[in-house]
């Protein structure tokens, strides 16, 4: 039982990083009803730029954070202009495919920037183990968890206390009505991408700091984990993204402890399939699916 | 004030509007009626910039706005409510109205950086005033999807009113309401919304039209078949045949 609880603690700590990734996906999906597959690779390129600065110019970790976030935002805006702004709103497949093409492009850029497979990634703090009764927590996991809480609070303030946040929610809630109200959805989309990229850049830094290394596969990894966590919680739902991220973290931590790394990776996909079969709308999106089903049956 | 000159619109093979002329004088309430598919909503969508006309012109205070987009038209002082209610379900009643005001103002740094519900903010004051006008102030903190249909229609009207429009379009404000609810919204429009404003009301319910409108225009198959004082228009044989049966 102690092992299980310890795994749950580890899972919640690491799952907070998944939650941030899922928030990035779900915020963009909520506003546009379109998937941005190059979200993970955008973060990977930001992290590569941060690593490049770390290896060649400065060991200042704050500078690495800044470069990682700034490059992630720049790449996010590049993706938004190319794959979403320039593509017609109803061409959802075209947007998704073009974001996949950009994914390949970003990986190529990263490989040219730093051609080795693996690079060290700096951390804010040296890793220590903190004992709490029969349990223990790694310091970098605590810092990731706490910073995630701060970011979630800031995102909540942005969405629910500011005018641009209100505009983002309006476009997400009813795009047609917002257009009729005079809200410029193109500007809102741009803003949403910028916010999501800041979240993504910080999430990338936190996760890679805990892992102490970065590889070109981080883009693929971040995309998969973010998408799975979003689907588990319910597409387009912000609380769902957080719950999905935490659930994924807990399940993976237990699967790793009881079955090893291969079982951990399989468990994520297995969990997703089970969720899609039992609750296709995810943990908190089931009501939306039920409404859609009812509307379909009425027709 | 608002003038339509020979406005025409085609969707594929369908001629939705045939050279419609319309003149809405400042400070008046005009009604627009017609059977389903007569072109009423298409006409309103052209006035509010959702569609551009294929032919003819739309003039607002003498300015040609035929090619202006919906958000540009909104900023020129045209607001509307919708036949199919288009509220923001996951936002509070007050936030629904504030969101409309955000769209109404030209984007600027002050708009971007401001707090959404700061007390004393002119937008919040205007939103609360609009809610008070339609009798929804007490429900300001409820989620919009918690409101029953008649109050949702009032919220739509409040959202349009908050922008202090020069020109207000109400698309079926009593749609789906019982006779008692229709009488209530009709009185609200007549006593609190119409005075001092220029409005166009689209509605099927003749009680409401005759209660609030000073001028009536009848469409059928995309053509204007009658226009004038509501009481005389509804007695014209072609109107009775086309619409009133």
Image (tube, coloured by chain):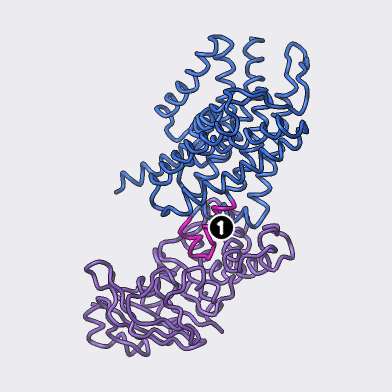
Chain colours: A blue, B purple
Report the front residue among B210 and B119. Answer: B119
Residue at position x 39%, y 70% in the image: B51
Q: Chain of mark 1?
A: A
Residue at position x 52%, y 66% in the image: B154
Relative to A65, is B34 above or below?
Answer: below
Q: Position of residue B139 (x, y in %)?
A: 60, 59
Q: Position of residue A260 (x, y in %)?
A: 55, 10
Residue at position x 76%, y 36% in the image: A62
Q: Which residue is mark 1?
A: A187
Report the front residue among A70 and B33. Answer: A70
Question: Is residue A188 one of those drawn in magenta?
Answer: yes
In the rendered structure, the answer to whether residue A271 lies left or right of residue A256 reads left
Report the front residue among B86 and A53. Answer: A53
Q: Quadrant of the C terminus of chain B?
A: bottom left
Q: Position of residue A99 (x, y in %)?
A: 46, 42
Give the magenta part as a residue range.
A175-191
Q: Residue B125 appears in which quarter of the rendering?
A: bottom right
Mark 1 surroundings within 10 Å by alpha-carbon count, few (fewer than 14), some (14 through 19), many (20 or more): some
């Amino acid at each position: 039982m102690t092992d299980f609880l310890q795994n749950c603690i580890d899972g919640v700590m690491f799952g907070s990083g998944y939650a941030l990734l899922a928030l990035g996906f779900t915020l963009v999906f909520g506003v546009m009803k379109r998937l941005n597959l190059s979200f993970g690779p955008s973060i990977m390129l930001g992290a590569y730029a941060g690593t490049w600065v770390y290896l060649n110019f400065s060991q200042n970790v704050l500078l690495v954070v800044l470069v990682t976030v700034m490059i992630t935002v720049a790449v996010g805006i590049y993706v938004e202009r190319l794959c979403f702004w320039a593509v017609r709103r109803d061409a959802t497949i075209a947007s998704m495919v073009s974001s996949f093409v950009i994914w390949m492009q970003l990986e190529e850029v990263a490989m040219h920037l730093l051609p080795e497979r693996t690079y060290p990634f700096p951390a804010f703090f040296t890793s220590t183990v903190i004992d709490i009764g029969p349990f223990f927590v790694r310091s970098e996991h605590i810092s990731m968890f706490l910073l995630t809480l701060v970011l979630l609070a800031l995102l909540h303030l942005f969405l629910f206390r500011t005018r641009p946040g209100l505009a983002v929610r309006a476009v997400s809630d009813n795009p047609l009505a917002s257009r009729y109200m005079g809200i410029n959805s193109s500007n809102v989309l741009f803003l949403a991408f910028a916010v999501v990229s800041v979240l993504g850049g910080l999430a990338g830094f936190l996760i890679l700091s805990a892992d102490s290394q970065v590889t070109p596969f981080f883009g693929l990894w971040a995309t998969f984990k973010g998408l799975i966590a979003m689907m588990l919680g319910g597409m387009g739902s912000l609380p769902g993204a957080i719950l999905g991220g935490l659930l994924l973290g807990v399940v993976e931590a237990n699967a790793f402890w009881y079955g090893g790394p291969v079982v951990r990776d399989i468990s994520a996909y297995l969990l997703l399939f089970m969720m899609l079969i039992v609750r296709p709308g995810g943990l908190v999106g089931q009501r939306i699916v039920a409404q859609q089903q009812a509307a379909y049956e009425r027709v | 004030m608002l003038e339509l000159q020979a406005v025409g619109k085609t969707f594929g093979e369908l001629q939705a509007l045939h050279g419609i002329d319309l003149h809405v004088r400042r400070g008046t309430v005009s009604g627009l009626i017609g059977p389903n598919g007569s072109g009423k909503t298409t006409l309103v969508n052209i006035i509010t910039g959702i569609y551009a006309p294929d032919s003819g012109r739309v003039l607002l205070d003498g300015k040609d706005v035929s090619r202006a987009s919906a958000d540009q038209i909104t900023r020129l002082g045209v607001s509307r409510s919708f036949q199919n209610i288009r509220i923001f379900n996951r936002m509070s009643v007050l936030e629904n109205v504030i969101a409309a005001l955000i769209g109404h103002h030209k984007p600027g740094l002050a708009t971007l950086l401001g707090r959404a519900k700061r007390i004393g903010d002119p937008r919040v004051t205007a939103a609360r005033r609009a809610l008070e006008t339609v009798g929804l102030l007490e429900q300001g903190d409820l989620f919009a999807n918690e409101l029953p249909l008649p109050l949702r229609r009032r919220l739509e009207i409040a959202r349009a009113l908050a922008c202090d429009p020069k020109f207000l379009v109400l698309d079926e404000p009593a749609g789906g309401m019982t006779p008692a609810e229709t009488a209530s919204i009709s009185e609200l429009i007549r006593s609190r919304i119409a005075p001092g404003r220029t409005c166009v009301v689209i509605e099927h319910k003749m009680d409401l039209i005759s209660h609030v409108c000073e001028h009536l225009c009848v469409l059928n198959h995309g053509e204007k078949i009658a226009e004038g004082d509501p009481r005389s228009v509804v007695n014209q044989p072609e109107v009775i045949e086309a619409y009133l049966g």
